Amino acid sequence: MSDISKEFHITDPVITSMVASIQILAWAVGPILIAPLSEFDYIGRKPVLDMSILMSFFFNLGCSFSKNTAQMMVFRFVGGLFGSSPLNVGAGVISDMFDAKSRNVALAGFTLAPLLGPVIAPMIAGFIVDNLQWRWVFYVLTIFNGVVAVLGMIFFKETYSPKLLKDKAKALRKSTGNTNLHTIYEITNQKFSTRMISTMTRPIKLLFMHPMVIGLGSFLAFVYGFMYLLIITFPTMFAENYGFSKSVIGLMYIPMGVGFTVGIAFWTVVIGKTYERLEERNNGVAKPEFRLPCLFIVGIIIPIGLVWYGWSAEKKLHWIMPGIGSGIFAFGFICAFQCCQNYLIDMNPRFAASSVAAAALFRSLFGFTFPLFANKMYRAMNYGWGNTMCAFIAFLLGVPFPIYCYFHGEEMRCRFNEKFDNEQKEQDKHALKAL
C-alpha cells in the first residue's frame, strides 16, 4: 500500500486503509445483491458463480490500470462485489452436496482457501513489489483469476435441487410433449420481480430478526474484523518495531497461515467427533446445537492470542513472539468460523445460503471498518492495551451466548425458524392453488 499511496499521493492513513479494505465492504453488499440469487429456481448456483468470476476478472484487471485513488477504489469495490459470491454461494453448494455428518470435512476445505488467501497474497506481493512494481500484483492476480474462471465454467455443475428439478421438467415437456409437467416452483402466481425481492431481502431479515444469526454472527464478525486489522497493520508494526523490509514483512504472515492450516486439521476432527458423540448420546438424533461446544474453548483461545500478540509487539520481544500470537489467534479463528458456519447451515438447510449471506454481511462490515480505526487505536492505546481490550470483548461475545445456545437455543431457534418457514409457506400456497 505504501507504493500505491505514494503514486496516488494519498497522505491520509484512513484513506490508505480504505483502499485496501473497501473490497471487504463489497463483500458485505454482495451477499445481499448476488448470493441469494443462487436460491432462485430460475437461476441456481452455476450461473451466479460463472458470471461472478468473470466480472471479478475484468475489474481486477481494471485495478492494474488505475490512474488515481477513485479509480482504484471503484474497481476494487465492484471486483469485490462479484468476488464475494463464491464465499457465500459455496456454502450453499456444500449444503446441496453433503449431509450434516460429512459436511464438516467439506466445509473445512472450503474454509481454508479464502483464509489462506490474505496470508499468501502479502508474501507474494512483498517480493513482487520489491522486484517489479505494485501493478504486477494485479497482473498476477488477474492471470490466476482467469485460469480459475475457465476451469470453473468447464467443470462446475449445477447443484441446487429446485433448479435441477426445473431443468428436468423442461426436458420432460420437450421429450414427451406433455405441457402440463411443471415443478411446484414454476406453478406460482408471483411475479419474477416479487420472488426476486423476496430472495434478496431474506439475508437482511435473518440478520436483524433471527437471534441465532445476530448472536453467533457478532462473535464471528468481531474476530473476522480483527483478522483484517492484523493483516492491515502488520506492515506498519513490523517496519516500525523491527525494521523489516517489505519482502520480510510478507514472510511474517506465515505464522498466521500455519495457525489456519493446523486449525483446519485439528478442529475438523475435534468438531466432527464432538458432533458424532453428542448425536450418539441423543439416540442418534442430530441437532445444530451439537456444533457449538468447541466455541466454549475457542472463546478463550482467541483472547489469549490477541493478548500474546499485542504485548509482544509493544515490548518489542523477538519477532517470533508476535508471530506466535497471530498463529494462536488464527488457530482459534478456524474453530469459530467452522462452528458458526456449520450451525447456520444446519439450523435451516433450505435457506442455508441466505443464513450464511446474513453472517457474511455482518462480518464483512466489521472487516471493512476495523482497519480504518486500527492505527488510531494503536496510537492511543498501543498494541498491548489495544489488544487486551479486544480480547475482553472477544471473550464476552464468544463464551456466554454459545453456552446459552447450547442449553436453551433449540427452542429459540425453532421459534424463529417457524416465522421464516411460514413466510415461505404462504408463497407455496399460491403454487398449490394453481394446481
Image (tube, grey):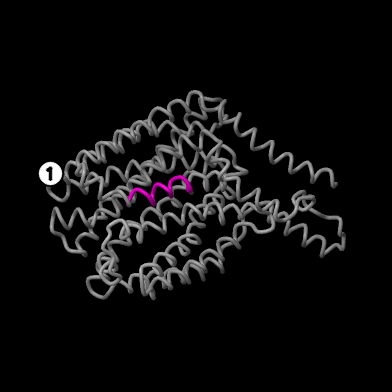
Q: Label 1 is placed on what type of residue? A: Lys
Magenta range is 360-371
What secondary structure characterizes most of the magenta part?
Answer: helix
Is residue 370 one of those drawn in magenta?
A: yes
> Which residue corresponds to mark 1?
315
Between 282 and 173, the one nearer to me in the picture: 173
Whether 57 is drawn above or below 422: the answer is below
Q: Quadrant of residue 7?
A: bottom left
Taking 270 as reference, is 360 above or below it?
below
In the rendered view, tell whether residue 140 sits above or below residue 235: below
Is residue 165 inside the magenta stretch?
Answer: no
Residue 142 picture quarter: bottom left
Report x, y in % for residue 363. 43, 46
Seen at 25% across and 48% down, the residue is 376
Question: Which residue is painted at 48% across and 28% down in the image?
Answer: 405
Which residue sits at x=54%, y=54%? Answer: 89
Image quarter of the N terminus:
bottom left
Residue drawn at 49 percent across, 37 percent down = 214
- Image location (x, y in percent) of residue 360: 48, 48
Q: Is residue 312 rendered to the left or right of residue 271?
A: left
At which x and y percent is residue 201? 60, 47
